[in-house]
Image: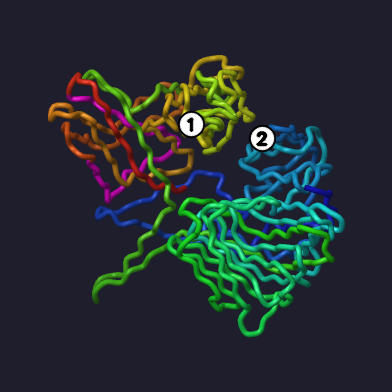
Amino acid sequence: MGNQISQQSAVESDTQSDYFPNPNSYDTGDTNPNKQDSDGNLICRSAIVSDEGSFRHTFESTAIIAITGTVTFTNGETLVTGSGTAFLSELNLDMYLRKTTDGVQYFAKIAKIVSDEELYLVDPYEGTSGSDGGTRSLFRIGYSGTGASISVTGGEVLLSPGTSATGYSVAYRDGDYLPIRCYGDLDISQRVANQVSKFGLMSEFTPGTAPEGQAVVIFDGANNTRAIFRTSKQATIYQDTAFTLPKGFTTAQHLDWEIKVLASECVLTIEGRIVAKHTDKIPGPYQVLNYGVIMENSAVVTSTTLSMTVLAFHNHDVVQIGNSDVGTPIKAEIIRKPGGFVFGQKNTASTSTTLVYSTAYTAPTSNAQRSIKSASANDAAAGTGARTVRITYLSFSGTDLVGPFTEIVTLNGTTAVNTINTDIGVIEKLEVLTAGSTQAAAGVITLYSTTGGGGSAVWSIAAGATDTESCHHYVASGKTCFIKSISFCTSGTVAGNGAIFWLTRQEPTITDTCERRISDILSVPGITPQTTTPYPAEIDVEGPVLIRGWCKPASGASYVNYLSFNYNEEQ
């Protein structure tokens, strides 16, 4: 990606907002827990926030903002330090940061702000190492090629891919998973052959790369009365609807474009009129979609500009209201963000109480740079076994636990590979992301406590598995986990080969804390199908905490015990 952008031609906005909740405002203190009356009804005296994570940008500002002080970046590291900086007052988690002398393509998303002189990025910094001034933006931006540019003037952001055969221009922000809505007020000065512009939601805004998930409007070719609505869950399998703009509109006019991505359909509207609806090949429920615009050339073209006055993203936290018979008050049910499920299995051959962990886990007590390697040479970048592993972890910050964060490591067989991040604390999960023909780990893959395969084993993925397969979940500080149901069974083939199961909690940031049971005792005899116990009044567990599952087999026979739980999580 190309040129450096001037301080008078970037995509940025003021830190203040007229919207509630303020997208630039983050709670840095303790929050009060939810309270219930004797009948289990929520007691609340506050506004109901239903658009958490939403964002609206109207491009009033004219510059990337230079921050105070000197900032030190290290290539390949997430830690950024400052001297004379004011990170806490000048930056927030909606922003991207780069070293001023690096190109615009090196803007990196801020993950956490520790102090006025210390913060962490979501991904390792790809720019050059060194100390310099810093600049911030509310967008990831980039452009390359003769005449390519991004500028802000007169309340509009202007993008041009230039005239080169490989020119491009892109501006986007990190998004979320459905249900979401993307809105833009935009026009294209002229439509030309050998150029494609896209507006909407995509899993990747990388030039020359087809995204996995998408819901976008595609402007290709010279006809300014036609466009394509494309949706997909996989890059090579998508659904296209070619349409003519309604009411005689053209793409050279400023029009309101809106894309809704729901669980069952994707809908495109122009000026409030539905022009396309897809229900077949649409993004999956947990595909993260970013939002923005990208313009790309495939041959030498004449100059074109896409101008946009508004870009908005709504991340819906649904509030459902259902009215019943006369005399009964209206009831409101808040639908929380889905959290996921936790699954574990344990082979047993005795009646001893045991954790439902497929492999042993030793919880770290401090942050460190760690390393990972396999017992098999086939677990490597071009091997038949596991090729890449994602480490999901949380970091210690004083008495708090923050995260989760992730790092993806490419394996090198029996040679240890060091992590890039140095703030890896406790581990939520290890999972194989990509693999060769075996589609699983060829050997035991182990995460070590220090670099170079040194120190002690923290956790491992068993040979033939794709993750740690353990009933285990960390809840970060300031968050609450709501356990909805617990499922359990055994592989025992006779009635006596059963087990009892339960969940516990333990604070990971305090030394020598006792483990406490948080669920009832769940019993299953042998030869019984999976049993699920739902909890209409969810089990709520406040972080920082480690939740894990236990079992006590009923006999000394050799069989496998399975335990999982479903949860939602909110802050």
Q: Position of residue 349 (x, y in %)?
A: 24, 19
Give me the residue at 74% from left, 58% from top.
Answer: 296
Q: Residue furthest top?
A: 455
Q: Is residue 212 shown above or below 268?
A: above
Exactly how many numbered labels are in the figure?
A: 2
Q: Nearer the viewer, residue 470 or 222?
A: 222
Q: Which residues are magenta?
A: 531-554
Give me the residue at 25% from left, 32% from top.
Answer: 501
Q: Is residue 105 shown above or below 83?
A: below
Q: Name the amino acid type tagged 1.
A: Leu
Q: Name the amino acid type tagged 2.
A: Thr
Give me the residue at 69% from left, 54% from top.
Answer: 138
Magenta segment's dominant SS is strand
Q: Position of residue 425 (x, y in %)?
A: 53, 28
Disc 1 is placed on an element classified as strand
Q: Nearer the viewer, residue 419 or 502?
A: 419
Q: Position of residue 344 (x, y in %)?
A: 35, 32
- Marker disc for residue 222: none
Can you tell which quarter of the image residue 275 is in? bottom right
Q: Residue furthest front?
A: 437
Residue 47 visible in image: no
Can you tell which quarter of the image residue 324 is in? bottom left
For marks 2 and 1 on the same chain, the one whose residue lies earlier in the sequence: 2
- Marker disc for residue 78: 2
Q: Nearer the viewer, residue 457 or 217?
A: 217
The crowding category of the residue bearing disc 1, from other C-alpha atoms within 10 Å (few below 14, some 14 to 19, many at least 20), is many
Find disc 1 in the rendering and name its residue: 430
Q: Position of residue 374 (x, y in %)?
A: 52, 21
Disc 2 is placed on an element classified as loop
